[in-house]
Amino acid sequence: MKMGQTSQPTTLQAVGIELMGGRSRRGCDSVSTSSSDFTCCQDAFRIKFNIKPQEPHSDLPSGSSQDGDFKAPTESVTRDLSSRAPRGLNLQVSQQPQAHLNVGAHLRPRQRRRRLLIKKMPAAAAIPANSSAGTFVRPAPRALDGRWVSLHQSQQERKRVMREACAKYRASSSRRAVTPRHVSRIFVEDRHRVLYCEVPKAGCSNWKRVLMVLAGLASSTADIQHNTVHYGSALKRLDTFDRQGILHRLSTYTKMLFVREPFERLVSAFRDKFEHPNSYYHPVFGKAILARYRANASREALRTGSGVRFPEFIQYLLDVHRPVGMDIHWDHVSRLCSPCLIDYDFVGKFESMEDDADFFLSLVRAPRNLTFPRFKDRHSQEARTTAQIAHRYFAQLSTPQRQRTYDFYFMDYLMFNYSKPFADLY
């Protein structure tokens, strides 16, 4: 059923009162078409949830960068934030931070045996103490068809799986401190109270365009150039605020991230950085990779760093003594966004980007004419990396190499409920 249509006013009215957690631009008119039903819906909705309209906020504590550890939101700031949450999000602040996860690519024999045992362990039944499992994301009244209810249920399931994975694999220490490093990939949009953790090759360029439009820095996502997105300073990072500013935003803003199937994300990064001219990745990464992993590399290859092959790139990725460090474009999501330490309110997926983005923008009361851009940010004439394309690249690897790469991204596969991409993986 299309948004805005009504087939059974009485039923939808009841569902609307149950689901709605904030007023939409259309109020209750998407629930019932009669004025009496509308008044009934509106009054019942206000009485049931005691919710007032929310406008974008600007009364925020200012602050500059400040180093040092600080604790994640504690019980002193723990409270039900439903009255301040964007567009009906009923948020609760984490009472006790979970352990941060740091899964390495290479493990000693004893650690490898432990990982195999852990893989076979049943998932923890209990939800971590800092979860907000009791909260309910209430779609706007304009979203009362089966599609939006399904999206809400999908969000609940994704967060459940993520929290159970964190509970199963968290470190022994129950007290962890959030540091500026943990929030260094999180971008801030204050007007709509949004925190977005950037995961490269999972739609991050276009999401930053959306945030810039939400912030009033541009009128359209199509007007924002690639260099402005990535090399400008229009969007602030969370680690540029002081301790108070970071804690305030972590405890009151809607925190979201978008993820992607790990092998597809890896292949997408390789194609982008090594199969096209690049003034940074070729001389910095390419030269080091060719010098270490290509026997009898030509002088031209060693001089330019161009022409890295996928198996050589995987050798670099899996090498415990890499000739050059890790890069955000192929690092673990668990390390980029610390989802076991920061309780994200919304987990989107690249594979369902259009629906997830539309749902999220509705929740934060984005302008109705703002949608997630569909255009490809770079190499627009080239096909997007799909599962079929990723399989062709991984077919170049040996079975042990595929297994070790899967182990490298094991936590991302587990936390975000992606299936094993090859049948022979364990």
Image (cartoon, grey):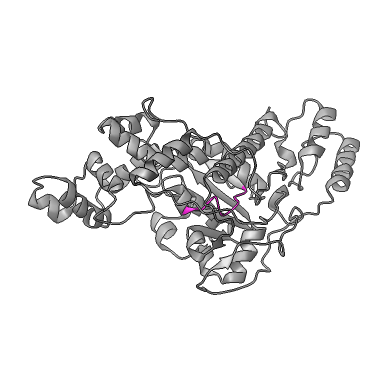
- Let me know if residue 17 is in the magenta part: no
* Residue 330 x/y as whole percent: 37, 48
Image point (88%, 36%), residue name: 37
- Let me know if residue 344 is in the magenta part: yes
* Residue 67 x/y as whole percent: 50, 73
Residue 381 visible in this rendered orientation of the protein = no
67 above or below 288?
below
Image point (25%, 32%), residue name: 396
Q: Specify the quadrant of the image occupied by residue 283.
A: bottom left
Quadrant in which the N terminus is drawn: top right
Q: Provide the residue span drawn in magenta.
A: 336-345
97 above or below 132?
below
56 above or below 117?
below
**Depth order, front residue of 271/243:** 243
**Depth order, front residue of 37/314:** 314
Quadrant in which the C terminus is drawn: top left
Residue 248 visible in this rendered orientation of the protein = yes
Secondary structure mostly seen in the magenta stretch: loop
**Depth order, front residue of 132/166:** 166
* Residue 23 x/y as whole percent: 77, 47
Residue furthest toward the front?
110
Image point (38%, 30%), residue name: 425
225 above or below 241?
above
Query: 420 left or right of 19?
Result: left
